[in-house]
Image: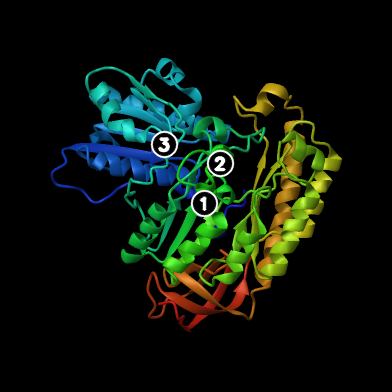
Amino acid sequence: MIKDESVEKIIDESQQGSTLTLENNHKNTRKLYIESYGCQMNFSDSEIVASILAKEGFNTTQILDEADLVLVNTCSIREKAEQTVRKRLEKFNAVKKTNPSMKVGVLGCMAERLKSKFLEEEKIVDMVVGPDAYKDLPNLIQEIDEGRNAVNVILSKDETYGDVAPVRLNSNGVTAFVSITRGCDNMCTFCVVPFTRGRERSRDPQSILQEVSELWEKGFKEITLLGQNVDSYLWYGGGLKKDYEKASDMQKATSVNFAKLLELVAEAQPKMRIRFSTSNPQDMTLDVIEAMSKYENICNYIHLPVQSGSNRILKAMNRLHTREEYFELIDNIKKIIPDCAISQDMITGFPTETEEDHQDTLSLMEYVKYDFGFMFAYSERPGTLAERKMEDDVPEAVKKRRLTEIIELQQKHSHYRTQQHLGKTEEVLIEGTSKKSDAHWMGRNSQNTVVVFPKEHYNIGDFVHVKINECTSATLIGEAVGYSKNN
């Protein structure tokens, strides 16, 4: 993965393991310490957990030693993430020796994958809670308070947490995530998500619109609609996506797909910037791209993971599209939204990948010239189809070399893309102080590229027109020329 300011929206390495704090309620007497790892879905879920536990008498703390309850919200996507969590559990164990009444729980995808093994292997863990069981936390905490271990990893067919208002934790007060779907039906052979987050279901659009409006009233200026696969959002009164065919004619006639949801959100708050993540090429439809072009407040940026440029490997991954279909989608995006930025996820060294397959990936990248990307060498995830049916047969040295070639090509394309902004004046939403200079603001343009410029009299949350004068491969550097009409 290229680590720079421009990619922190999706997986921010600096956020991994960060603790969450919120305003204390003086009536609450117990202390909750919660750490999050992995994707933004997990950070969003931690906000839901904190909200549920605030009503159960818990205030958050950043001091581990004083916590009554320690929760770690986990990720199963890569082995490194699981190893990090195991190391943290060892640390919690050491603290537990001096504070034996402290309880420890594992939440999220790793909890779902390992289930009760956690209670057996990690003697320190008192509670294991899967991603659909957070509303059961009050009961589970009662169990552990009474000295029993507690597990709930049942995956739900209908839990979307649409009725839990998440507490915004460690927020910049400007940008927020709004979950619209949970689970995934796509069954890519390398991925654990369908096993850890269950079947796909969508959240009631009215609850989404209500949350977006409440965020606007609190001063937030940008939201990202979040889901494992946002393009397959489909609300027809509740239920799983796969059961839509059994819906009544009335349900089908009044159903809301992702393009329609985008339009509803864009119209509800015309000055709120709207982003979404993550898209899946096999599910993205032209009406989504047309909705983006129709509404000025929907950002011109699509995160469109492809994983490989080889048709043979795409088939082995159970990606239900071909290289040619992907190109057709890219062509349509560029035709309808010429200045749309596109980013990628890429896995190199998938089982049986040949040098020819690798060259196909490089040639696909040349065709698209992505603005930025997230690139990984394949690592086998227990429980996935690839782990059960395929031998991880590409040598580590070959994986590393191919990954280096992919990253170098991406850096070249990133620089090519940032250069296209030179001389233009673009709207930027100020998110905070630049990481490299206290005298400069940092914000993003519509294409999700980081823009840095002198602070002058502007403030966090302002929409500002910035003239772009210089660039690196990841960042645009410019000067503000005035406020935009969106303030």
Q: Which residue is mark 1?
A: 255
As shown in the figure, which amino acid type bears the numbered disc 3? Asn
As shown in the figure, which amino acid type bears the numbered disc 1? Ser
Residue 170 point in image, percent of width and height:
35, 53
Please, what secondary structure does the residue beneath circle 2 have? helix
Disc 3 versus disc 2: nearer the observer: 2
Q: Which residue is drawn at the image coordinates 44% and 72% (left, top)? A: 271
Quadrant hosting residue 50 = top left
Q: Which residue is drawn at the image coordinates 37% and 22% (left, top)? A: 151
Q: CA distance from mark 1 to mark 3?
A: 33 Å
Q: Which residue is mark 3?
A: 73
Disc 1 versus disc 3: nearer the observer: 1
Q: Earlier in the sequence, mark 1 or mark 2?
A: 2
Q: Against 148, is 197 above or below?
A: below
Q: Which mark is residue 244?
A: 2
Q: Against 370, is 357 above or below?
A: above
| Front-most of residues 99 and 390 | 390
| Front-most of residues 120 and 395 | 120
